[in-house]
Image: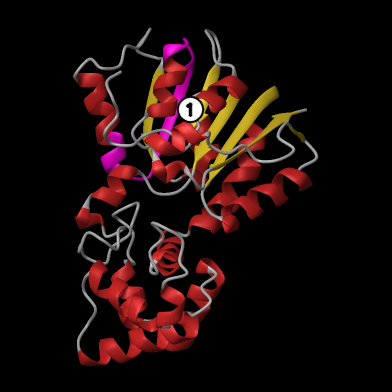
């Protein structure tokens, strides 16, 4: 496969090491993205059900197939489905993946989504306030920013972004939108930055923008990310064969806490990673967005 410019898969070597793919084995990639994890599984002879809610991700994988960058052993090696992993049980059964050797979730935003200004995920691109992973969803970031009352905005920023200055930021947003609607991501980022006390701005970690937590919070709400994950995880265990493995890569503490609680409370699973696995320094150097990744692995008893 050529260098994947659509999305660089995170912790690829570690995922493959734990999932142990091979001929005759079946896997589900619940978040195919640019297909990095899926292609690595296919290269080792596995059969893969690849799911994504973003049509652009599905189109990217199809392009890789059409241009010959991916080689499939048979026409049945890859089943590509657009869908929400909250429906993973139904999708799996419909496609003949009701008993699998492994499932991978690579949560968060793809590089393509971040780098495409029109998708509205990045505070540095000046795109429209969208943030929908599935562009058929009825609510955009614009609707939240311009229509939700101040109390609700504060609650969102505090709960899903763990933002210390949530109240000040919510108040500033409501004041700004009284003059005119907030249309662009960079407009919102400036309002957020102006809301953070000047003495605090310099304390932010290198490469961490003051808008990061608020954008995360809005994105989580737009896409129902935590709710979808909570619904998907029990279904996933039902799909695993005995000794089948579940690999989950999370990128922020709310996701990781949800995953950790689930794995600890699920009696049908044996946790294989006492502590989450993070990227090596060499991976962070080549892919800085991997720095917050945490991989947890469990095995069906």
Residue on which disc 1 sits = 12
> Mark 1 packing: few (<14 Cα in 10 Å), some, or many (20+)?
some
**Residue depicted at 32% across the width and 64% down the height:** 138
Percent position (x, y) of residue 228? 52, 53
- Judging from the image, what secondary structure is the residue with disc 1 in? helix
For the question of whether residue 100 can be seen, the reply is: no
Q: Which residues are magenta?
A: 43-58
Q: Quadrant of residue 247?
A: top right
Percent position (x, y) of residue 189? 31, 71
Q: Is residue 214 above or below residue 244?
A: below
Percent position (x, y) of residue 245? 65, 27
**Front-lying residue, 138 or 132:** 132
**Residue depicted at 62% across the width and 23% down the height:** 18
Q: Quadrant of residue 101?
A: top right
Percent position (x, y) of residue 166? 48, 80
> How many circles with numbers are drawn on the protein?
1
Horizontal relation, residue 254 to residue 40: left or right: right
**Residue depicted at 56% across the width and 26% down the height:** 14
Horizontal relation, residue 265 to residue 36: left or right: right
In the rendered image, residue 46 lying in the magenta stretch gets the answer: yes
Q: Is residue 42 above or below residue 211?
A: above
**Front-lying residue, 34 or 100:** 34
In the rendered image, residue 194 lying in the magenta stretch gets the answer: no
Applied colour scheme: secondary structure
**Residue depicted at 21% across the width and 65% down the height:** 128
For the N terminus, the image quarter is top left
For the question of whether residue 228 can be seen, the reply is: yes
For the C terminus, the image quarter is top right
Find the residue positioned furthest to the right: 267
């Amino acid at each position: 496969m050529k260098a994947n410019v659509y999305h660089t898969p995170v912790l690829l070597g570690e995922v493959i090491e734990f999932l142990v793919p091979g001929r005759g084995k079946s896997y589900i990639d619940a978040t195919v993205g640019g297909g990095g994890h899926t292609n690595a599984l296919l290269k080792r002879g596995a059969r893969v059900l690849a799911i994504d809610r973003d049509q652009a991700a599905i189109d990217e994988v199809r392009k890789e197939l059409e241009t010959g960058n991916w080689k499939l052993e048979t026409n049945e090696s890859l089943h590509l489905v657009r869908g929400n992993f909250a429906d993973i049980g139904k999708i799996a059964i419909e496609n003949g993946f009701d008993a699998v050797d492994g499932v991978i979730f690579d949560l968060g935003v793809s590089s393509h989504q971040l780098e495409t200004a029109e998708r509205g995920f990045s505070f540095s691109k000046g795109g429209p306030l969208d943030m929908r992973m599935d562009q058929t969803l009825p609510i955009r970031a614009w609707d939240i920013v311009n229509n939700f009352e101040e109390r609700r905005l504060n609650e969102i920023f505090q709960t899903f972004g763990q933002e210390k200055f949530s109240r000040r930021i919510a108040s500033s947003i409501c004041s700004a939108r009284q003059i005119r609607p907030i249309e662009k991501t960079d407009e919102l980022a400036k309002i957020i930055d102006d809301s953070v006390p000047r003495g605090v701005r310099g304390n932010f970690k290198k490469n961490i923008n003051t808008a990061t937590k608020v954008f995360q919070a809005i994105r989580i709400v737009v896409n129902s990310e935590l709710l979808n994950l909570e619904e998907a995880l029990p279904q996933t265990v039902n799909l695993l064969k005995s000794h089948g493995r579940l690999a989950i890569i999370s990128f922020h503490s709310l996701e990781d806490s949800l995953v950790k609680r689930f794995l600890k409370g699920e009696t049908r699973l044996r946790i294989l990673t006492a502590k989450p696995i993070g990227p090596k320094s060499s991976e962070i150097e080549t892919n800085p967005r991997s720095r917050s990744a945490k991989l947890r692995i469990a095995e069906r008893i």
